Structure formats: C-alpha cells, structure tokens
Amino acid sequence: MSTSGSQPLEDARVGVRLKISALWIAMLFLFANGDILGFFKPGQIEQVISGEVSGIKLTELFLFSASAYVAIASVPWRGAAPPPSTVRAAVSGSVSR
C-alpha cells in the first residue's frame, strides 16, 4: 500500500571498511566478555597472580604482543584520511610553491 507522499525504501550501501571495523569491535567485546566472565571460575585469579593461565606464561613479551594485536584496529591505514598536501608533494617528488 502506497500513499501519495511515500517513497519506496532503498537498501543502504554499507562500505566494506565499516563492516570490517564493526566485526573487529564485536570481536574485541567478545574477548573482553570472555576474559571478565573467566575471572568467576574458581582459581582463575590465583592463576593470573601466579603468572600462568592454562599453561600460558604471562610474560612481558606476551602481554605486549596481545596489546599490539588489539591496537592494530586503532591505526589509520592507507586511504583512511588524505595526508596533508606537503606530505603528498614530498612523496610524489614534486614540490610546488
């Protein structure tokens, strides 16, 4: 049923980058949820304090690697925003004044 002033609905096009970002955020929330709920298991906090969880040693390198893995989503990759004109000129090799 259509009224005189209504228009048909159109499918909104969602960019691939937005879809990937949304999936990444959802995955991070699932990781956080699993970690937080995992602390309710008996003995889990004692394992974390001892420095070994499920056979994995919690070293500084491991914690840094896990942090770097999560931080990847916050890095603006190529095409995210155009660089300033001076950077574009320096990269292309032509500087106009």
Image: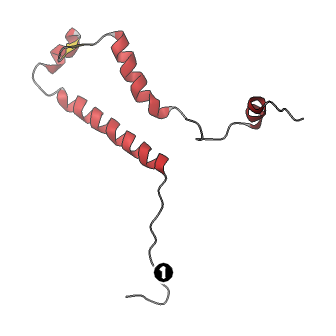
- In the picture, the quarter occupied by the C terminus is top right
**Mark 1: few, some, or many residues within 10 Å (few <14, many ≥20)?**
few
Q: Is residue 85 left or right of residue 58?
A: right
Which residue lies most toward the right here?
A: 97
- Residue in view at x 48 percent, y 33 percent: 74
Foreground of the two, 73 or 47: 73
Q: Is residue 77 above or below residue 41?
A: below
**Label 1 SS:** loop
Q: Position of residue 96 (x, y in %)?
A: 87, 35
- Residue in view at x 44 percent, y 74 percent: 9
Q: Is residue 35 left or right of residue 25?
A: left
Which residue lies most toward the left here?
A: 42
The quadrant in which residue 93 appears is top right
Q: Position of residue 73 (x, y in %)?
A: 45, 34
- In the picture, the quarter occupied by the N terminus is bottom left
Amino acid type at circle 1 is: Gln
Q: Position of residue 66 (x, y in %)?
A: 36, 22
Reading the image, the residue beneath label 1 is: 7
- Residue in view at x 23 percent, y 30 percent: 36
The quadrant in which residue 80 appears is top right
Q: Position of residue 6 (x, y in %)?
A: 47, 83
Q: Is residue 63 left or right of residue 77?
A: left
